[in-house]
Image (tube, rainbow, N blue to C red):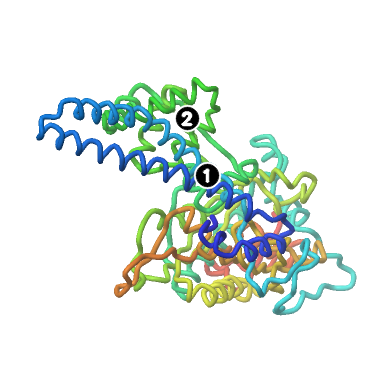
């Protein structure tokens, strides 16, 4: 989320940043929306001030026994009270219009990010290691050929269970996947100073909005819902104050009568999110039949939201979190891409890195995080390169991103295995996550970073392709052998 004050102060700089993203100028339209919001706030404040002043005048008039004035002031107060709901609704609507407009605009790139349209304009920063050498008589195979020949990777059975873009791993390959995840977590917690987290993989709308998966990228996500019971209703309604319940239920009923969609009504709740309001939303959802949750696309979502709606003592920063979780992506925009194999799956494992830091430390933390992800590949003996993404290839929330691309002999090219991004205060504004120094008079937004440390499925792909042997077996990298019970090679059963 962008700071409207910064846009007002320097609209040209904001539009220049959008232009580097290949987007049209927006500052003028955003400032116009903000003017309507400010006018609505002023109108409400003036009405409140006049109501309070007139209320005081009633007491003054009563003291001097001026009954005519008393009735006049009472009539004025009553009239002002009658207009308050409309003014409050106008203020809420104007605020939401600005928030909605800002929520759809991506973050602005740092000055040192190269301009470009797509991945062909990315800039290689460094390269590590060498591609493995194979006998001249042997053509390296792709991972799915290796896994299927071993009898330990089954896409057909997975399709019967769940459809396309799923896989069933068996035996030594299932253990290798587990070994990779454990190895990465041990490295990041034991040597890199990250705290291990085991987060939920189901999250609310507000968490997805906080890290910017919503609203713009809802089509790329998996959503789930459950039927609520009468027991849920009794529990939820018991936890909600009657005044708050009545207010929210009344507003939702009005929206429903106006033909609002369920998503629009959810947006109303999320725009004033807190625990009580979520409880009340569940109560409303019961009457409408379901509670909606999102399957996380990455552990970035729950781990970054650990600091949402909080003020962190700056002496505690940086906070560094890591988690190994299942991740879920609909891959809505990936039709026809990587349809075979494990490169682009609906369900996959990933070890994620998240840092919460101060503005002054963010760029150094970005370099550190990237080096932590690179170390995983170095320990596995894999050939890789690190590239700086151009403005046209960056993620929505990022200000600067490094992609780490591992060499895949079966494909004969580098493929992304990690992406490390610094987001500035973009996510923190959406989460209202702040920090405060001991000697500071006010708070400020934290800066957030996230990166893959690394994608487990793609690491498995890389190990299979780089350590494949001419006899069809796969050697186990030395770093993983302790996690494989000392196994040195995966071979097909006779």
* Residue 237 x, y percent position in the rendering: 30, 28
Using the image as rendered, state which of residue 243 and residue 304 is in the foreground: 243
Q: Label 1: which residue?
A: 36
Label ID, residue 226: 2
Can residue 488 be seen here? The reply is: yes
Question: Could you tell me if the residues under marks 1 and 2 are in contact, i.e. CB atoms within 8 Å?
Answer: no
Choose between 211 and 487: the one closer to the eye: 211
Q: Nearer the viewer, residue 35 or 173?
A: 35
- Answer yes or no: is residue 484 visible: no
**Total marks drawn?**
2
Q: Is 47 located above or below residue 257 in the figure?
A: below
* Quarter-of-image position of residue 468: bottom right
Q: Residue at x 47, y 45 (%)?
A: 39
Position of residue 440 in the picture relative to residue 40 (left or right) = left
Image coords of residue 366 (percent x, y): 55, 72
Disc 1 or 2, which lies upstream in sequence? 1
**Residue 228 badge:** none
Q: Secondary structure at mark 2?
A: strand
Choose top left, top right, bottom left or bottom right for residue 281: top left
Residue occupying image coordinates x 25% and y 36%: 54
- In the image, residue 361 lies at what x, y percent? 48, 75
């Amino acid at each position: 989320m962008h700071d409207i004050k910064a846009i007002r102060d320097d609209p040209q700089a904001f539009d220049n940043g959008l232009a580097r993203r290949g987007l049209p100028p927006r500052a003028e339209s955003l400032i116009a929306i903000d003017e309507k919001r400010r006018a609505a706030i002023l109108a409400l404040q003036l009405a409140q001030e006049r109501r309070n002043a007139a209320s005081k005048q009633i007491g003054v008039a009563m003291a001097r026994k001026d009954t005519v004035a008393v009735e006049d002031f009472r009539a004025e107060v009553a009239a002002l009270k009658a207009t308050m709901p409309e003014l409050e609704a106008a203020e809420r609507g104007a605020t939401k219009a600005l928030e909605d407009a800002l929520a759809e605009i991506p973050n602005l790139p740092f000055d040192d990010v190269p301009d470009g349209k797509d991945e062909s304009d990315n800039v290689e920063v460094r390269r590590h290691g060498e591609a493995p050498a194979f006998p001249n008589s042997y053509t390296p195979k792709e991972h799915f050929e290796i896994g299927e020949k071993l009898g330990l990777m089954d896409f057909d059975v997975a399709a019967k269970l769940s459809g396309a873009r799923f896989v069933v791993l068996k035996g030594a390959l299932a253990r290798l996947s587990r070994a990779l995840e454990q190895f990465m977590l041990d490295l990041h917690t034991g040597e890199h100073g990250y705290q291990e987290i085991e987060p939920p993989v189901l999250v609310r709308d507000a968490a997805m909005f906080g890290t910017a998966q919503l609203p713009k990228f809802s089509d790329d996500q998996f959503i789930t819902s459950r039927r609520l019971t009468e027991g849920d209703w009794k529990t939820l309604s018991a936890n909600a104050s009657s005044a708050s319940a009545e207010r929210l239920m009344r507003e939702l009923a009005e929206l429903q009568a106006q033909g609002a969609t369920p998503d629009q009504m959810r947006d109303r709740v999320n725009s004033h999110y807190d625990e009580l309001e979520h409880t009340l939303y569940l109560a409303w959802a019961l009457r409408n039949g379901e509670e909606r949750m999102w399957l996380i696309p990455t552990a970035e979502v729950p781990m970054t939201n650990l600091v949402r709606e909080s003020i962190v003592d700056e002496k505690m920063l940086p906070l560094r979190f890591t988690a190994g979780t299942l991740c879920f992506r609909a891959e809505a925009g990936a039709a026809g891409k990587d349809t075979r194999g494990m490169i682009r799956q609906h369900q996959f494992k990933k070890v994620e890195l998240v840092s919460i830091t101060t503005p002054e430390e963010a760029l150094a933390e970005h370099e550190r995080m990237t080096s932590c992800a690179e170390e995983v590949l170095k320990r596995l003996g894999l050939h890789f390169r690190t590239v700086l993404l151009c403005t046209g290839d960056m993620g929505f929330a990022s200000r600067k991103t490094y992609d780490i691309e591992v060499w895949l002999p079966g494909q004969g090219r580098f493929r992304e295995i990690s992406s490390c991004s610094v987001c500035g205060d973009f996510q923190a504004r959406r989460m209202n996550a702040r920090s405060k120094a001991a000697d500071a008079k006010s708070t400020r937004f934290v800066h957030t970073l996230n990166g893959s440390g690394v994608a487990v499925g793609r690491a498995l792909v890389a190990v299979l392709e780089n350590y494949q042997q001419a006899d069809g077996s796969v050697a186990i990298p030395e770093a993983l052998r302790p996690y494989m019970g000392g196994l040195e090679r995966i071979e097909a059963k006779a």
